[in-house]
Amino acid sequence: MSDIGIIIVTYNSAAEIGGCLDAALARDAETIVVDNASQDGTVAEVLRRGVRLIANSENRGFAAAVNQGFNVLNNPYVLLLNPDVVIQTSLEPLRQACDLTGSA
């Protein structure tokens, strides 16, 4: 497992989240989905892939959901993704950029 964590906040994203999760899982990053009370098949798509899930009973909003994800990840690097994003390359260049002098 890499030192990069991925947080995906979602709400009613069943049609999009599958590709996002498949790509994230291929990057060997710890991935967590925070679902804001979706009423479609979003939770089923997440569970089908065995991704860690926080399923809220109400829509807590984006910022609160991000904070929930941060509270359970212990990674020094965290990438926030929308559920319609499909990562197409390695995350390593992003991690390296974070370590450049003056990047903080």
Image (tube, grey):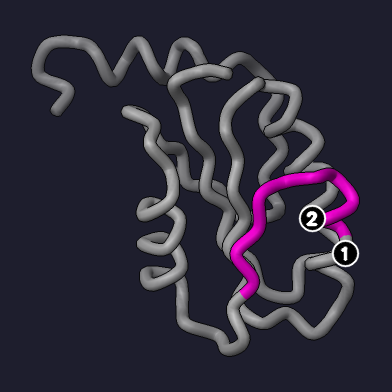
Residue 25, percent across and down? Answer: 73, 30
Looking at the image, is 41 positioned above or below residue 94?
Answer: below
Disc 1 marks which residue? 44
Tell whether position 39 is magenta: no
Residue for point 20% across, 11% down: 100
Compared across the picture, whether 53 is left or right of 49 comes to: left
Residue for point 17% across, 22% down: 103
Residue 40, percent across and down? Answer: 85, 79
The CA distance from mark 2 to mark 1 is 5 Å
**What residue range appears in magenta?**
45-55
Looking at the image, is 94 positioned above or below residue 38?
Answer: above
Disc 2 marks which residue? 46
Residue 44, percent across and down? Answer: 87, 64
Q: Nearer the viewer, residue 52 or 7?
A: 52
Instruction: Give the farthest residue toward the left.
Output: 102
Compared across the picture, whether 3 is left or right of 56 comes to: left
Instruction: Give the farthest residue toward the bottom.
Output: 58
